[in-house]
Image (tube, rainbow, N blue to C red):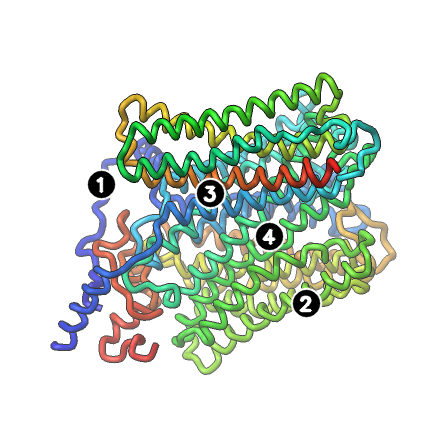
Amino acid sequence: MAEALELTADALTMEREWKTPDRGTVGIIFLIVTESALFLIFVLAYLVYIGKSVVGPYPKDVLEMPIAATVCLLSSSLTIVMAEHQLEKNRIGPFRLWWAITILLGLYFLYDTALEWKKLIYVDHLTISTNLFGTTFYSLVGLHASHVTVGMTFLLLVFTVSLLGFPIETQKRRVKFLSWYWHFVDWVWVIVFTVVYIVSAR
Amino acid sequence: MASIDYPLERPAVSLEKGFAQHLYEWVATVDHKKLGLMYVVSALLFFVIAGLMAFVIRLQLMFPNGHVVGPDTFNRLFTMHGTTMVFLVGMPLVAGFANYLVPLMIGARDMAFPRLNAFGFWIFLFGGFLLYYSYIGGSGLYGAGSAPDVGWFANAPLTEKAFSRGHSTDYWALGILVSGVGSIASAINVIATAFSLRCPGMTLSRMPLFVWVMVVDSWLILVALPPLTAAQIMLMLDRYLGANFFNTQQGGSAVLWQHFFWIFGHPEVYILIFPAFAILSEVIPVFSRKPLFGRAAMVGAVVAIGFISLGVWAHHMFAVGMSSWSNTFFAGSSMLVGIPTGLKIFNWTATMYGGKLRLQTPLLYCCAFLFQFLVAGLTGIMLAVAPFDWQLHDSYFLIAHFHYTLMGGLVMGIFAGIYYWFPKAIGKMYNEKLGKWQFWLMIIGFNLTFLPQHIAGMLGMPRRIYTYAPGRGWELWNLLSSLGAMVQFVAVACLVWNLVHSALRGEPAGDDPWDGWTLEWATTSPPPEYNFEKLPVVRSSRPLWDMKHPHDPDWKYE
Ligand SMILES: [Cu+2]
């Protein structure tokens, strides 16, 4: 009997002290893992087909380094951290400000991509069907841009509900996950930028 | 273990619910058990459909110069058979078993993301319907329709617009892509559930091996399925936007498709076989009355497979003409993956050795798995030797090899699991006598079908031929093979009858008919929606043993 009681007390302590990782954290980490695998294949396809186009235009003739867009996207990773920081301290005003800056930086990136594609299509006559460069370029950069767009949609959603008076400070966890996703999209851009604008355009 | 409490009452079921209400309950459910059952039932439905296709294939090949179906229909039959078995039978079985059992085994009330879970199931089913809609809409409604006929691995450039007109290939790519989204959703869910929702005391080292295997399986899904998704997106870009990924005229590479497909395709074999590994690791100990032999080594082996199997894909491509360095590398890595697999077979056998065996249907199927999967492993090692593969590549020897893996291995393991957990999920006992009948018919039929195919293959019979001329020595083996298919047909009919009849008229099973050791047997059969009235607290890897034997609990020795 004494043993049984001892066990129960023991079990209660175990129950109280039991800790497991947060499910959202685990979920978002493995979402990023699976997305990385998807990007990896498109990057590989791009690398394999470098220099294999049978007709022009070729990367070194038409690609210009999107320096401004890259700076914008990468600094948006910093501004979103600043926003999170303010949210942590429940300072909604500064949070909205940093969040808005993040959105503007992201939007500039997308705008710049649109301009780049317009130039490539109308001036250089490079489309997805022109050659292997066009095929791999538009699909890789497009896949990344589509991820930026998804991230942007959620950024705008958070911003809008916050402006409408929704108590965003109750959603710190979800804001954190969104910011992780945004960081992921930025890191993918570093790889895409290196592969497309540095390696293949040399 | 005083804090594991049995729920006091069975869940109250109102008898006044109408059909519409029942339907609504199932369609709108986010309960992991209902979703798990729906996954398994839809997998079994697709299993019967794809099985019937195989049956027609065997009828066509029963005698030389067969006239049952024409060559075009034959191409569609083997394409749809393979695609269905892999993506609409194997994958939902993974998700179904994981969904039903993982939360119960770790003492949780549901999956980590119940609504994502429901989304995963319905998007999978939609993908399945999309694939089968090709029979109606395959040639864009101009003609009578046609199913995909490009084979289950859909080699480029056969799938390009120039060679594959109409829309049947689009249905293949889209249907699989969409159902793949469901698999990804379910895999993320399983991992998050296993990491985050374990009940107090359920450390990773105490987690049932079933859950471990399912976690590694989900990991493989997350890293191996995206390559297929990517390749299918590229194929769709080629077909709809005129991209050139696999367009050889513009320098595109057909071999690249093969690489991308098999980077997915080989891990996929392990994704499919893992549920059988998981089931054996639970059924064999309980039916041998012994704890699993070498538990830590089993976990290690499964994790090792989860990594090594990512680096062996090009053994499907020895005949492509890769460099001899690549051939050597992939032959070597393919043999390497045989080591942890062999270790698992050894440990299961060692668990049975000296045990008090209860030779009931679940254990019988486990034994069949051990024998047949061993044969599959041995022919697999043979095919991993590149020069040997050059001789028998794409012959019936290969067909025999992977049917021993997937039918002799996976399906037998799944049958063991279905019989083992049927009493838990339905609350009724299956008919043991009919189960044994099905077992003997199944293994006789299965071996009669696929053992002769090894010989037909070595005599030079290639896969995917719709008929053959007499006088090559293939007649007898094909005849035996087709007769075996008929025996299997009867066996599967026995299974379906057994499940349906027992679900309606079976004896009540009780909560713990097998005297089990994992937590799913600690609740009622079927479990209530909330699984456990009070979350259990666990102190060893056999929590139910501890509860049943308070004077000799496992945790004293762990
Ligand atoms: Cu393989």
- Helix or strand or loop: what does disc 3 sit on? helix
Image quadrant of ligand 1 equals bottom right
> Considering only order in the chain, which callout, 2 or 4, is on the residue closer to the N terminus?
4
**Label 2, label 1: how many angstroms apart (C-alpha)?**
57 Å
Query: Mark 3 — residue?
Result: B185
> Considering only order in the chain, which callout, 1 or 4, is on the residue closer to the N terminus?
1
Q: Nearer the viewer, residue B226 or B316?
A: B226
Residue B229 screen position, x and y as percent? 60, 40
Is B163 situated above or below B542? above
Figure label count: 4
**Label 4, label 3: how many angstroms apart (C-alpha)?**
16 Å
Q: Residues within 10 Å of mark 3 (few under 14, many from 20)?
A: many
Q: In this view of the protein, can residue A143 be seen by the observer? A: yes
Query: Mark 2 — residue?
Result: B335
**Label 3, label 1: how many angstroms apart (C-alpha)?**
33 Å
Query: Mark 1 — residue?
Result: B14
Query: Mark 4 — residue?
Result: B268
